[in-house]
């Protein structure tokens, strides 16, 4: 396979991105977030979201998802034709990060969520998931009070129930890698106690080296889902300092060691890490990807 | 400060190594392992161990230590004049790794420990510490049975008590990054139950991405000491695949977040990470070192 991107994130060919997604879709992963339908001016790396989507060879066993934050993005994701559209509402616990990342005030964010609800309902998509970004802290504002996070979840949960919809999942996103393991445990416990029966998921970044320690804490309190990225790829261009999510391969390896079945073929995933590194043109931070399968399975 | 090493581990000037040690000695760290007195043929990177030692500006608040595995190394470390000589005995849980790393069979390793005891006693050094390398697994042999580790600790503890000495510390070294958090907890508990009152320390490598998760488990069971390396520098040339220890700065940051006082000034430590990266000529894996102090302390 040839990769022509040469490591410039603005110039990675759409076909290379799709090839990476196709590789991941053969590993046993059951949910893959492919791209983001966001402003091509603000995030030129994602300007080819529709094209990438069109190049993916759909594996019917996989739920493909895309990120979007407004009605325009929602409709682009629907139009792409390959996505499981999750009716998700999002608020940001740091108003400074919201302004930088989404160019929105808190009030504008809330308005956007209300209009998204209408758009979801018009499209026949149940509104089931709420998420809070920067839920553990912010590179512009510092630590974020947990009360703020709880109040935003409450706001979103009310929007969901006011719309006659049923909340199924609450996601806390540690967008800039501020969480620590003690917070992971106490936040998850408090969310569960306030919204019993609702699934809790976490989105962890490794900005401060605690990603895997936080993942351990999350797995041991039994969170329902953890986001990760192949090789630890990624990082938000508006986060001040960028680091990717916890590496999928390290997380799968940790799960294997803890006896948690992921259904993922780690050897196949290591091949995807290799592809990801060729696509972006530089080594990625995940550690397990540096090992030959023989060194993993001795 | 000028660094002339250009990243070649065989050519890093001794003065640059000493400058890194001197930088670390101003961070609040109270114990710094400077170098290894080992065969210059087998490990040319350490051929300048005596020279590096002579260039260190000794901070009387810091205990400087050096690694050695035999009488020759012990005497070189003593002659260097700056080291706190710890009377340590070491065995390797994987016989394949012992042969590659130390060119010794198990029987030869045990003989060496006995002769080390005599050498320690002749030098007036109390024999207080025993360590097992490859205690969690081996890149040549795979997982190592814990019974093997326990039996090696027992062998070493017997050598110590037969010599009329008193065991104060047991160290388990995860030399090739095979441990998982559940093992950390159960191994530490078992060692404590068999050798009550003896301190337990761990030496963790991040070969498989679990270094920080293992450190979390270790801190939460209250181990007495954890080894780490600035920036996550390091890795054994005979380990098959090399990865450094858990990064000191990430570990200190984790401790701060968990409310564990380390006495280390994290800002000063970040300056040492920068020096370490200039000395080796490439980025190191630690994450916290990539942040400006402002992003750590918001």
Image (tube, coloured by chain):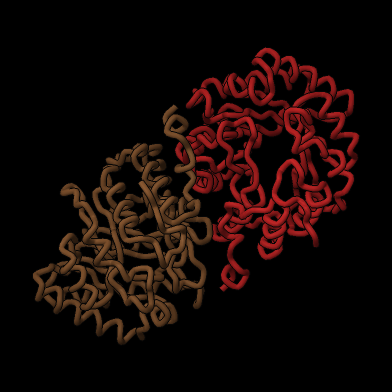
Chain colours: A red, B brown
Q: Residue at x 36, y 37 (%)?
A: B267
The x, y position of residue B56, in whole percent, is 23, 55
One can see residue B277 in this view = yes
Pick the quarter of the image with the C terminus of chain A.
Answer: bottom right
* Of residues A245 and A202, the one drawn nearer to the viewer in this rendering: A245
The x, y position of residue B126, in whole percent, is 13, 67
The x, y position of residue A40, in whole percent, is 79, 31
* B59 lies above or below A264: above
* B156 lies above or below A241: below
The x, y position of residue B223, in whole percent, is 32, 53
* Of residues B39 and B261, the one drawn nearer to the viewer in this rendering: B39
Q: Quadrant of residue B13?
A: bottom left
* Of residues A122 and A14, the one drawn nearer to the viewer in this rendering: A14
Q: Residue at x 55, y 60 (%)?
A: A257
Query: Could you tell me how many numbered marks the image carries?
Result: 0
Pick the quarter of the image with the N terminus of chain A.
Answer: bottom right
Q: Residue at x 21, y 68 (%)?
A: B77
Q: Quadrant of residue B4?
A: bottom left
One can see residue A153 in this view = no
């Amino acid at each position: 396979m040839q990769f022509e991107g040469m490591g410039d994130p603005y110039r990675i060919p759409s076909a290379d991105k799709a090839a990476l997604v196709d590789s991941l879709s053969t590993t046993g992963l059951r949910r893959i977030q492919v791209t983001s339908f966001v402003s091509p001016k603000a995030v030129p790396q994602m300007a080819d979201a529709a094209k990438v989507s069109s190049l993916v060879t759909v594996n019917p066993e996989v739920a493909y998802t895309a990120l979007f934050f407004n009605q325009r993005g929602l409709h682009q994701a629907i139009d792409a034709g390959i996505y499981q559209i999750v009716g998700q509402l999002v608020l940001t616990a740091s108003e400074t990060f919201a302004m930088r990342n989404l160019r929105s005030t808190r009030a504008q964010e809330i308005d956007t969520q209300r209009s998204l609800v209408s758009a979801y309902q018009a499209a026949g998509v149940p509104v089931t998931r709420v998420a809070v970004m920067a839920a553990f802290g912010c590179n512009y504002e510092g630590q974020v009070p947990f009360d703020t996070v709880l109040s935003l979840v409450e706001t979103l949960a009310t929007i969901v129930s006011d719309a006659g919809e049923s909340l199924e999942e609450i996601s806390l996103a540690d967008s800039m890698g501020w969480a620590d393991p003690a917070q992971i445990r106490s936040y998850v416990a408090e969310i569960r106690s306030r919204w019993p029966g609702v699934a809790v998921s976490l989105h962890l970044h490794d900005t401060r080296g605690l990603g895997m320690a936080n993942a351990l804490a999350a797995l041991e309190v039994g969170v329902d889902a953890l986001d990760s990225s192949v090789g630890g790829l990624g990082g938000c261009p508006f986060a001040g300092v960028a680091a990717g999510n916890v590496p999928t391969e390290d997380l799968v390896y940790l799960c294997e060691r803890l006896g948690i079945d992921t259904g993922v073929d780690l050897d196949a995933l290591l091949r995807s890490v290799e592809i990801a590194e060729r696509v972006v043109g530089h080594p990625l931070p995940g550690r397990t990807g540096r090992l030959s399968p023989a060194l993993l399975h001795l």
